[in-house]
Amino acid sequence: IAASEDLSARLTRALGDCAAAVTEHMDGAISRAGGPSPRLMAAMRHAALAGGKRLRPFLVIESAALFGVARTAALPAAAALECVHCYSLVHDDLPAMDDDDLRRGQPTVHRAFDEATAILAGDGLLTLAFEILAREDAGPDAHARITLVAGLARAAGAGGMVGGQMLDLAAEGRFAAGARGTPTAGEIEHLQALKTGALLRYACEAGAVLGGASAAERASLDTYARAIGRAFQIADDLLDVEGDAGEVGKAVGKDAAAGKATLVDLMGVPGARAELARLVEEARTALAGFGSKATLLAEAANFIANRRN
Ligand code: GRG
């Protein structure tokens, strides 16, 4: 127990260090973006710089570290990915989507500013991500940077996160023509794999690209990423169901109240907990070939499964 407490403390410290470095990088990138509207820049800062676990940047940095890549060399890719994540949260919170008032313990961007500014702040962060990745410091050479750009576009776009969000809205019965009753477990898994899984997989893929990983190493990391992606979503659904969210403003049972079917509804809480344990094991096993270099990534699987916000 002492050893695992030690590991959990090490992970907490590493997440904190990573968050500080990524926030500083994003701050610099937003400042460089300039722009004629102080209001827009303030909204982008509000969305990007306050709070968040910075889990995706951590995964980029730790995946790259498996191949000896220094944190500074992985920071641009990590910051670019977090910009996309932050944009997705801003748009997800809009009245046309989830209509949320609070995010990361503070007013959502459309509440703190206004709806049009929030839409544009999200757009500004999305496009900034690709500017960050195109800069020379984002990868060892032009080929690596193009691979990072193409991978992020694919993960975030219509075949990834945006497509998953659309399937989620359809599953809620938003579009009369697409309403089809309660989705099956397979359909929920598919939409979640796209909506939240695609960016988590990209985080590990980016680390592999930066590190020049072999095909076998990429495959192992991808198995890990898929498993933690599923674990992340089940943990999120359990937090909703159990109303045990530590984050201020996270509505209890919000997804259920919004009519969203979740895997927890279909599996029951004990079934979901068992599936979480299985996924953590699968994720940790996938890292076995990396030895002790993967200790923090392995611990991150536990963290994701047991998170309280
Ligand atoms: C609107 C284009 C568009 C996409 C939205 C990711 C997403 C798609 C919506 C987020 C809605 C949501 C709360 C999903 C549950 C899982 C999730 C992504 C939670 C937020 O991610 P965390 O826990 O957040 O990593 P922090 O604040 O720590 O960064």
Image: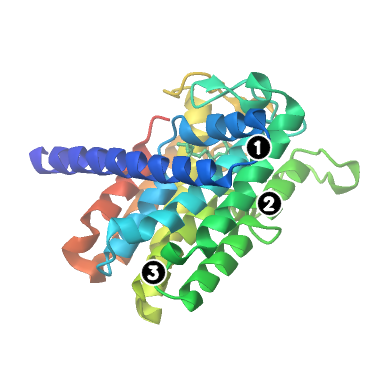
Color theme of the render: rainbow
Task: Report crowding for label 3: few under 14, some 14 to 19, many 20 or more residues within 10 A (C-alpha).
Answer: many
Residue at the spot x=49%, y=42% of the render?
Answer: 234
The three-letter code of the residue at mark 1 reads: Ala
Q: Where does the image place residue 159, in percent across and percent down from the top left?
A: 68, 62
Q: CA distance from mark 1 to mark 2?
A: 17 Å
Q: Where does the image place residue 110, in percent across and percent down from the top left?
A: 68, 25
Residue at the spot x=74%, y=42% of the render?
Answer: 169
Q: Please give the residue where the numbered disc 2 appears in the rendered image.
A: 162
Report if the beta carbon of the residue with label 2 is closer than 8 angstroms to ligand 1: yes
Query: Upstream in the sequence, badge 2 or badge 3?
Result: 2
The three-letter code of the residue at mark 2 reads: Val
**On-image quarter of the N terminus:** top left
Query: Relative to residue 7, is residue 272 drawn left or right?
Result: right
Q: Are marks 1 and 2 in contact (CB under 8 Å)?
A: no
Residue at the spot x=51%, y=67% of the render?
Answer: 148
Mark 2, secondary structure of its residue: helix
Q: Residue furthest left?
A: 2
Q: Please give the residue where the numbered disc 3 appears in the rendered image.
A: 210
Classify 156 as above or below 23.
below
Which mark, residue 121? 1
